[in-house]
C-alpha cells in the first residue's frame, strides 16, 4: 500500500493535512508527482516537508520553471515562479538553501515500478502535456497515442482534476467512480490523482490517492483554506487570483 500526492503548489496548510491523513492510515511509502512549488506562498516549507518525509518525487512544470525558466506561463504563474526562486535563493541558512536547490535539481521526469508509471503530465510528454477529460471527445487520437506508452497503470497530475482515463477512450470522474477504482489485469488506465494544494474540479478539498494491489481510493480532505488565501493576499508578488481560486476549487 502506498499514497500518491501531486500539485502541492506551495500550499503548506493543505500539505500538512494530507500528510497527517496518510500517517493516520499507517502508510509509510509516499510518491509525489511534482509541482511542489509554484502559485502559492510557502515554497520553502513545502520543499522541506517533502525532503524531511523522504517522499520520492518527480519534476512538474512549475518545479522546472523555478529551477530553470518559466515557459508558456501566464503572468500570474510566471510572477510566482520568479518570486519562489528568489525566496529559495534568499534563504540565509546555506545548508537549507543548498539542500532545497539540490533536491529540485535531482528530480527525474518519471518513476517506474514494474508495469506502473508515474509522471507529472503524461507518459508522452512527462512534464508539460495536459490530459483533459474533454480529450476523449475532442482528441481521441491523442488519447490513443498516450495509451501506447502505458503498460498497465499510469499515474499523473498536472490538470488538478482527479479521475480515471480508460483506453476506449473514456473518462470517469471521482463522483462517477464513488471515489474508488478497482484495478484489473485486463485493463489499462491513466489515473489523475488530483491536487493537494490547488484543486480545479470545483471541489475545494485537497485530493490524493491510496493504492493497494486491488484498488485505488481517491481521498478528499478539508484544510484551512483561508490560512493560505490570506498568505497569498499578503504577498505583493503573488496574484490575488491564486488565493481566490482556492475558495471555489477552480
Image: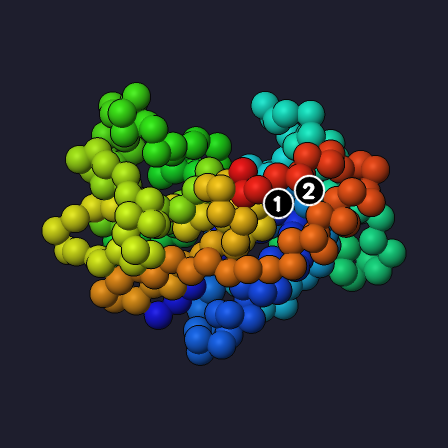
Name the residue that disc number 2 marks.
Answer: 243
Does the rendering let one see residue 69? no
Task: Provide the secondary structure element on which disc 1 rests.
Answer: helix
Image x and y of residue 181, in percent: 26, 56
Name the residue that disc number 1 marks.
Answer: 247
Q: Nearer the viewer, residue 59 or 46?
A: 46
- Horizontally, residue 108 falls left or right of residue 245, namely left
**Which colour assignment does the render follow?**
rainbow
For the residues labelled 2 and 1, say whether their Cβ atoms are less than 8 Å apart. yes
Q: Residue furthest left?
A: 186
Q: At 57% across and 42% down in the image, what residue appears?
A: 248
- Whether 209 is drawn above or below 76: the answer is below
- Horizontally, residue 157 falls left or right of residue 165, namely right
Q: At 44% across and 75% down in the image, what residue appears?
A: 25
- Whether 17 is drawn above or below 124: the answer is below
Q: At 55% across and 60% down in the image, what residue appears?
A: 222
Image x and y of residue 211, in percent: 34, 63
Quadrant of res 142:
top left
Amino acid at each position: 500500500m502506498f499514497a500518491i500526492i501531486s500539485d502541492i503548489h506551495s500550499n503548506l496548510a493543505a500539505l500538512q493535512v494530507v500528510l497527517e491523513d496518510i500517517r493516520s492510515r499507517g502508510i509509510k511509502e509516499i510518491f509525489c508527482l511534482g509541482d511542489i512549488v509554484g502559485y502559492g506562498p510557502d515554497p520553502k516549507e513545502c520543499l522541506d516537508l517533502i525532503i524531511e518525509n523522504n517522499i520520492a518525487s518527480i519534476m512538474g512544470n512549475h518545479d522546472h520553471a523555478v529551477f530553470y525558466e518559466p515557459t508558456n506561463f501566464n503572468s500570474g504563474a510566471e510572477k510566482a515562479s520568479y518570486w519562489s526562486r528568489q525566496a529559495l535563493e534568499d534563504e540565509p541558512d546555506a545548508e537549507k538553501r543548498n539542500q532545497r536547490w539540490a533536491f529540485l535539481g535531482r528530480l527525474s521526469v518519471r518513476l517506474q515500478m514494474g508495469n506502473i508509471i508515474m509522471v507529472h503530465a503524461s507518459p508522452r510528454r512527462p512534464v508539460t502535456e495536459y490530459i483533459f477529460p474533454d480529450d476523449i471527445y475532442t482528441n481521441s487520437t491523442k488519447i490513443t497515442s498516450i495509451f501506447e506508452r502505458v503498460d498497465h497503470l499510469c499515474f499523473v497530475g498536472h490538470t488538478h482534476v482527479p479521475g480515471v482515463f480508460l483506453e476506449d477512450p473514456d473518462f470517469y470522474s471521482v463522483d462517477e467512480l464513488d471515489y474508488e477504482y478497482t484495478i484489473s489485469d485486463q485493463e489499462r488506465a491513466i489515473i489523475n490523482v488530483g491536487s493537494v494544494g490547488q484543486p480545479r474540479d470545483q471541489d475545494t478539498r485537497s485530493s490524493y490517492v491510496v493504492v493497494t494491489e486491488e484498488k485505488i481510493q481517491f481521498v478528499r480532505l478539508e484544510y484551512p483554506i483561508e490560512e493560505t488565501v490570506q498568505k497569498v493576499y499578503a504577498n505583493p508578488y503573488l496574484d490575488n487570483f491564486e488565493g481566490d481560486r482556492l475558495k471555489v476549487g477552480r
